[in-house]
C-alpha cells in the first residue's frame, strides 16, 4: 500500500489543499477509503490531528471517508466546513519542519495502516505563519522611513515613546503632556510645533 503526495498548497488562512495517490498491491485504489491525517515535526512530534484529538495521542481517534478515483483523492486539511475536520492553528508553522502523516484503510480485512514516509509541507503552508505577526516582531527598524502617513494610523492611535527627528506638525488635534511622558514630564521641548487645532501642554 503506497501513498504519493501530488501537492500540499493553499494560501492563508489555515487550510492546506492536499492531493495524493493511493495504490493497494501496486494497483490504483478506487472506492471509499478511510483516512487519518496529522501534522508532525521533523522529529515526529505530533502538532495537530485532523479531528482535534489531543496531540499526546499518536493517531487521530476518528477517520475521514474520502472517495478515491483511480488512485487519486483530495482533501482540504483544516477546513472546518468538512465534518470531522478541525482548524490548523497558525502556531503549528512556527516549527521549522512540518510534515503530513497519513493513515489509510481500504476497508478490506487489513486494518488502517500508516503511510511512509511522512510528507514535508512546502512553503505555502508557511504563508500561514507570515499571516500571524508575533508580539514585538515589528520595530522601528522594520518600517521604511516616510512609509507611514497619517492616513495609515487610526484617529485613536496611541503613541508611546515616540521620537520625532524633524518638525512635528499636528492638524486638527490636541497635544497633551501624556504624549511626552506623563502629567509632569521632567524635560520636554519642541523646536517647532505647527498645529491648526488646540495645543495643550501641561
Image (tube, rainbow, N blue to C red):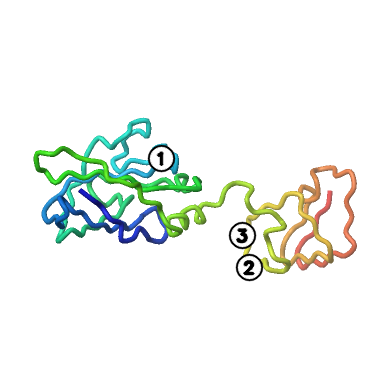
The numbered mark at residue 154 is 3
Q: Distance between the residues labelled 1 and 3?
A: 37 Å
- Nearer to us in this view, 201 or 189: 189
Residue 57 is tagged as: none
Residue lying at 83% horizontally and 62% vertically, measured from the top left: 165
Circle 1: element type: strand
Q: Residue at x 80, y 60 (%)?
A: 164
> For mark 1, what is the residue?
47
Mark 3: few, some, or many residues within 10 Å (few <14, many ≥20)? few
Tell me the element at label 2. helix
154 and 122: which one is in front? 122
Farthest residue in the front direction? 26
Among the two numbered marks 1 and 3 on one chain, the one whose residue lies closer to the N terminus: 1
Which sits in the foreground, 131 or 195? Answer: 131
Q: Classify mark 1: residues with Cα within 10 Å, few (<14), some (14-19) or many (20+).
A: many
Residue 183: x, y in percent? 81, 43
**Is 150 placed left or right of 8 in the picture?**
right
Q: Which residue is drawn at 67% across and 52% down?
A: 158
Do callouts 2 and 3 mark residues in contact (Cβ within 8 Å)? no
In the rendered structure, the answer to whether residue 187 lies left or right of residue 128 reads right
The residue that label 2 is drawn on is 151
95 vs 111, left or right, is right
Amino acid at each position: 500500500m503506497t501513498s504519493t503526495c501530488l501537492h500540499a498548497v493553499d494560501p492563508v488562512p489555515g487550510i492546506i489543499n492536499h492531493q495524493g495517490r493511493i495504490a493497494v498491491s501496486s494497483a490504483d485504489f478506487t472506492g471509499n477509503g478511510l483516512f487519518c491525517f496529522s501534522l508532525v515535526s521533523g522529529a515526529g512530534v505530533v502538532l495537530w490531528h485532523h479531528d482535534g484529538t489531543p496531540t499526546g495521542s499518536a493517531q487521530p481517534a476518528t477517520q475521514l471517508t474520502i472517495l478515491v478515483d483511480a488512485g487519486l483523492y483530495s482533501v482540504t486539511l483544516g477546513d472546518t466546513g468538512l465534518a470531522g475536520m478541525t482548524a490548523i492553528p497558525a502556531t503549528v508553522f512556527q516549527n521549522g519542519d512540518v510534515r503530513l502523516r497519513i493513515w489509510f484503510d481500504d476497508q478490506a480485512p487489513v486494518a488502517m495502516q500508516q503511510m511512509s514516509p511522512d510528507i514535508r509541507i512546502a512553503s505555502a503552508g508557511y504563508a500561514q505563519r507570515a499571516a500571524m505577526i508575533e508580539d514585538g516582531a515589528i520595530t522601528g527598524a522594520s518600517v521604511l522611513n516616510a512609509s507611514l502617513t497619517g492616513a495609515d494610523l487610526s484617529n485613536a492611535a496611541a503613541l508611546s515613546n515616540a521620537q520625532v527627528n524633524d518638525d512635528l506638525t499636528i492638524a486638527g488635534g490636541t497635544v497633551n503632556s501624556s504624549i511626552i511622558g506623563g502629567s509632569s514630564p521632567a524635560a520636554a521641548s519642541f523646536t517647532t510645533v505647527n498645529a491648526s487645532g488646540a495645543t495643550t501642554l501641561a
